[in-house]
Amino acid sequence: MALDTARDMSLSRTAMKAELLDAETELRLAYAWRDERDEASLHRLITAYMRLAISMASKFKRYGAPMNDLIQEAGLGLMKAADKFDPDRGVRFSTYAVWWIKASIQDYVMRNWSMVRTGSTSSQKSLFFNMRRVQARLEREAAAVGETLDKHQLRAMIATEIGVPLHDVEMMEGRLSGSDYSLNATQSVDDEGREWIDTLEDEGAQAAETVEADLDTEQLREWLLVALQSLNARERFIVTERKLKDEARTLESLGKELGLSKERVRQLEAAAFQKMRRSLEGQSREVVSFLA
């Protein structure tokens, strides 16, 4: 931590000593980089405005990110701005760079706020960085006139104020209300080291359910084999190809193989199913539904 603080101070001191560019010099450097890819001009332009990047990074310290990381992200944003800056538009580089620096820092903060991705849409960004401030102001204004806002009213007003959908406000409120916790953390000192992960329900099949399912499957298989014995060879072939294969054959393909019309194969299939239903009456609804 001490090393990080010293590094931050060193970067700040270096940035404060950098030259201040007038508009003419700034424009000349921007043209040199854009048209000639002059790296010395790019370095001079970025160095001159690093103090701006550091100043903007310091405004995001309250989100808990290390200052050194914030400065690095601000520097990346500054370099992107320099690479995309068009001096022909008549805008000062500092004005253009502010947007890129801020966007880079905000993306970093949101990526590292939680292990669960917070989101990166414009509405989610607006909520993440403005919701608490807008909420506090709305509550102060309501209290000044003797009103009390319930949660639904407050969410609706925040959505209107920031210009985002209500469901985005509800989602972001949940994301900002708590921190990440490890499932391996103990619940309390009184639980003899019991971890939170121990309270999660196992979604896999339990042993009793697996055994019961296996027995049912075996019983259905036996009933189905008995029913198939009531059919002649051609009917068994049709039923097997139509119902018992991973990829069912079409009536047309079976008709070609058996030398029959598609309609005749359909009739034989229906007759076979009727025989099997009679054989299975009173045995199993599952097998009867299979023959539907």
Image (cartoon, rainbow, N blue to C red):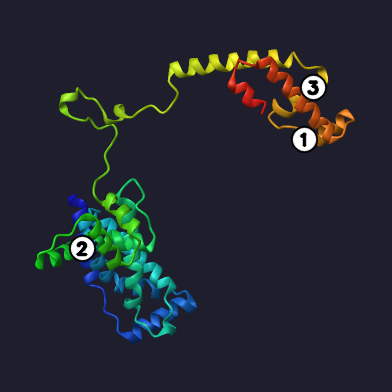
**Against 242, is 225 above or below?**
above
| Residue at (37, 83) in percent of width and height | 91
Mark 3 and mark 2: Cα distance apart in space: 75 Å
Residue behind mark 2: 133
Q: Nearer the viewer, residue 266 or 181?
A: 266
SS class, disc 2: helix
Which residue matches tag 1? 250
Q: Let me know if residue 105 appears in the view.
A: no
At horizontal 64% and vertical 14% (from top left) the residue drawn is 223
Q: Position of residue 207 (x, y in %)?
A: 44, 17
Quarter assignment of residue 59: bottom left
Callout 2: few (<14), some (14-19), or many (20+) C-alpha neighbours within 10 Å?
A: few
Q: CA distance from mark 1 to mark 3?
A: 15 Å
User: What is the secondary structure assignment of the residue under circle 3?
Assistant: helix
Residue 284 appears left or right of 248: left
Seen at 30% across and 74% down, the residue is 48
Q: Is residue 269 visible?
A: yes
Q: For mark 3, does the 10 Å Cα neighbourhood hold few (<14), some (14 to 19), or many (20 or more) residues? A: many
Determine whether the residue tagged by mark 1 lies in a helix, strand or loop. Answer: loop
Residue 146 is left or right of residue 272, and the answer is left
Apparent side of residue 13 relative to residue 223 in the rendered image (left or right): left
Indicate the amino acid at tag 2.
Answer: Arg
The circle on residue 89 is none
Q: Which x, y percent locates residue 46?
A: 34, 71
In x, y percent, where is residue 263?
A: 83, 35
| Nearest-to-viewer mark from 1 and 3 | 3
Q: Residue furthest right?
A: 259
Q: The disc labelled 1 sits on which kind of residue?
A: Thr
Quick one: label 1 or label 2, which is nearer the N terminus? Answer: 2
What amino acid type is highlighted by mark number 3? Answer: Glu
Q: Are marks 1 and 2 in contact (CB under 8 Å)?
A: no
Residue 235, numbered label: 3
